[in-house]
Amino acid sequence: MSNQNKFFTFLENVVAPIAGKVGAQRHICAIRDAFVTAIPFIIVGSFLLVIAFPPFGENATNVWATFARDYRDEILHPFNFTMGIMTLWIVTGLGYNLAKSYDKTIKSPLLAGVLSLSTFLMISAPVTEGKLEMAYMGGAGIFTGLLVGIFVPELMHFLKKHNIGFKLPTQVPEKVRESFDLFIPILIVIVTIYPLNLYVQSQTGFIIPQAIMELFKPLVSASDTLPALLLVSFIAQVLWWAGVHGSLITGGIIAPFVLANLTTNQEALAAGVEGTQLPAIFAQPMLDFFMMAGGSGATFVLVLMFLRSKAAHLRAIGKMSLIPGMFNINEPVSFGTPIVMNPTYFIPWILVPQACGIFTWAMFKLELMHRIIAIPPWTAPTPLGAAWATNWSVIAVVTVLVNYVIATAIWYPFMKIHEKQLLEEEAKMAAAQQQAQSTTQPLTA
């Protein structure tokens, strides 16, 4: 067996099963689903931020710029209660989804979500003069939210598994019994997590979310680097090629970091920092619209090539994949071609997103393009999504078009290799059919 075949066999028989198990792991699934819960709030909040900070100079006098200056506080009020408190949605969703995976012990996952929210607020939102502090309800509290959202369901699962709690008569209504299941977890939170918060504050001057952000600063900084971006893309693409939904797996892991980067940019923009000089580059739209135009592998240009292919199979796939590809849905081309498990396409499948990522990173790093401040829906057409994410930067559209050219140059030779193989197969099938027809035709006098 050649080294190439050994490599592909290794991916199929070793990497894919391991990745499948990781992707099905209950905590990763719960984190992923919690972020999915928060997506509508994040998208709407991002859109409001774009309205509040139009892509013009602060002294611009057009209608949009004037409206944004005069009513910025009013525009940002809904932002403050959508994306501005996104960690509240995430911690509640995480507590709920993780508890739901323990359905044999935790009968009411909603209560687990509510207790997760309460615990997070207890340590992250100190009351000052009767007002809750909101500083850690957004991206700055995301890591604390994840820890709390995991701790509370695990605590409830442990207590129920070991029959620790109130024993109520069976005559008591089910909902009442479920609510009593929270008494012990609430007491444990109050006598452990809350005193821990007070202790940390007395020793460091930080409440727990501040201390956790200090601990995670090196990881957040490391996540906003080109090697980190390329590594995430590489892992996702390899898993996809092996038949596993790589984006779901890597997305669940990197979500806290890319959201923290996005929040950093939003805070800097609100503080008056120039759009091209915002601190972070790696946010989710970097993958969705700059590196993966048309879906994983940046396959939209491949679909366009298929439409002009001489091979009937590829033309059919191109027609079937065109509309979905416009909205970054590429399962028809990935599985219909197929690209998945197809050695012919392995190199461009990995290389295209890497090349597009390097070029886009350079555009950001050279301060030629407004950096990312919003998260559009991932199904937005690529040029639109890229412009939306970068506060309607025209250079973002140009960058996407250049990425199309890069992707075309890499995909083209491999597509022609596959096309040649298909044409040979189609020619053999046509010859076989013609021969079969000639042998079945009746002899004439």
Image (cartoon, rainbow, N blue to C red):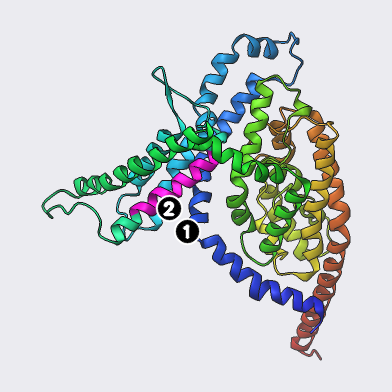
Indicate the quadrant containing the N terminus: top left, top right, bottom left or bottom right: bottom right
Tell me which corner region of the image, top left, top right, bottom left or bottom right, holds residue 7: bottom right
Q: Amino acid at mark 2?
A: Leu
Given residues 33 and 349, the one toward you in this image is 33
Q: Residue at x 77, y 50 (%)?
A: 227
Side of 156 where 287 appears, left or right:
right
Q: Residue at x 53, y 50 (%)?
A: 32
Side of 29 where 350 appears, left or right:
right
- CA gap, disc 2 to disc 1? 7 Å
Tell me which corner region of the image, top left, top right, bottom left or bottom right, holds residue 419: bottom right
| Image coords of residue 354 (percent x, y) | 80, 52
Given residues 256 and 49, the one toward you in this image is 256
Marks 2 & 1, CB-CB < 8 Å contact: yes
Quick check: 388 above or below 23? above
Is residue 144 shown in magenta? yes
Q: Amino acid at mark 1?
A: Arg
Residue to which mark 2 is pinned: 98
Q: Residue at x 70, y 53 (%)?
A: 232
Side of 230 where 405 appears, left or right:
right
Quick check: 8 above or below 65? below
As drawn, the residue found furthest toward the front would be: 203
| Image coords of residue 296 (percent x, y) | 70, 53
In magenta, the rendered stretch is: 142-156
Residue to which mark 1 is pinned: 26
Q: Residue at x 32, y 54 (%)?
A: 106
| Image coords of residue 350 (percent x, y) | 77, 59
